[in-house]
Amino acid sequence: MDIALEQVEYRYQPNTPFERLALHNISLEIPSGRYIAVIGHTGSGKSTLLQHLNALLQPTKGKITIGDRVIDAGKKEKNLKAIRQKVGIVFQFPEHQLFEETVEKDICFGPMNFGVPEDVAKKRARELIRLVGLPEDILAKSPFDLSGGQMRRVAIAGVLAMEPDVLVLDEPTAGLDPRGRREMMDLFYELHRAKHLTTILVTHSMEDAAAYADELVILHHGELKRKGPPREIFSDPEELEKWGLSVPDIVRFQSTLEKRLGKKLGKTCLTAEELAEELQSLLKRGGR
């Protein structure tokens, strides 16, 4: 499902002494099936932007097209439930959204609330619990008896149970250790590929943005500053510094290495594997 924002503005508490401009003149196209990472420092408008993607927030100016639905500023929209079924959001600490007495009931709650028959919802729960890497017998357990990592996977299964076309991830690895973060990001990437999901990742991690996204979107003080492929964006660290951002560690290491060698490698490497390949190629050429 394609998503397009046209000159979108959003103000919190408009026409009050507490009015605050959070998004300004955002125009952005997100084609179906793409993996987009939205990056920016704290307060740049990332979380506000993502809440517009399934109409949790509606623009104070401009319009948003989500599939075949158009959300115009100032118009009272009806049946937003259909949008929220197609655009699933995994918020920070999604395990805080769990509330049912069993894992199965928690996963089934969303689809049944959208009119899916109970037997179909239970079948989805069985399929998805395995897909997120948990054993099927966990369905009978209370979600509150699980580990934090297991709870997070259950919450993700609950979002996937509604069979969204678009998956929005708001800092989904917050609070996880490096291994847990890598496992979770790999899981999302496999879901993106297997289910052909449009995936939108909001993150502070330049490493995750570099490793998984097709395209980066940079927000700064509520404005869209730049959009482009990770390799292109991270090839200009000075520009990123203007917006309070840095390059991934591997890009910084490559820059230091190039200065010591007195040579430029063939491309900006986004992973350790890419850097190893470039160095191997350099050695084969005899360091020329």
Image (cartoon, rainbow, N blue to C red):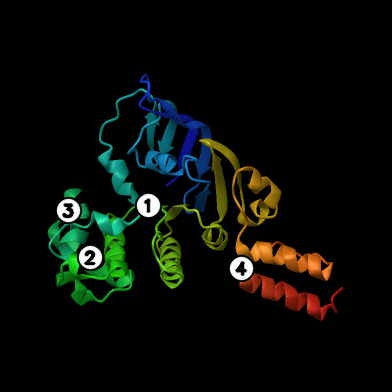
Gap in angstroms between the C-alphas marked 4 and 1? 29 Å
Image coordinates for residue 157, horizontal then vertical, percent: 29, 62
Q: Which residue is mark 2?
A: 125
Q: Residue furthest front?
A: 17
Q: Which residue is mark 3?
A: 112
Between discs 1 and 2, the one toward the N terminus: 2
Q: Which residue is mark 1?
A: 165
Could you tell me which secondary element the residue under label 4 belongs to?
loop
Between discs 4 and 1, the one toward the N terminus: 1
Gap in angstroms between the C-alphas marked 3 and 4? 42 Å
Kind of residue at disc 3: Met
Could you tell me which secondary element the residue under label 2 belongs to?
helix
Residue drawn at point x = 65 percent, y = 55 percent: 234
Which one is closest to the eye, mark 4 or mark 1? 4
Gap in angstroms between the C-alphas marked 2 and 3? 11 Å
Residue drawn at point x = 56 percent, y = 57 percent: 206
Image coordinates for residue 108, horizontal then vertical, percent: 19, 59
| The disc label shown at residue 271, or none | 4
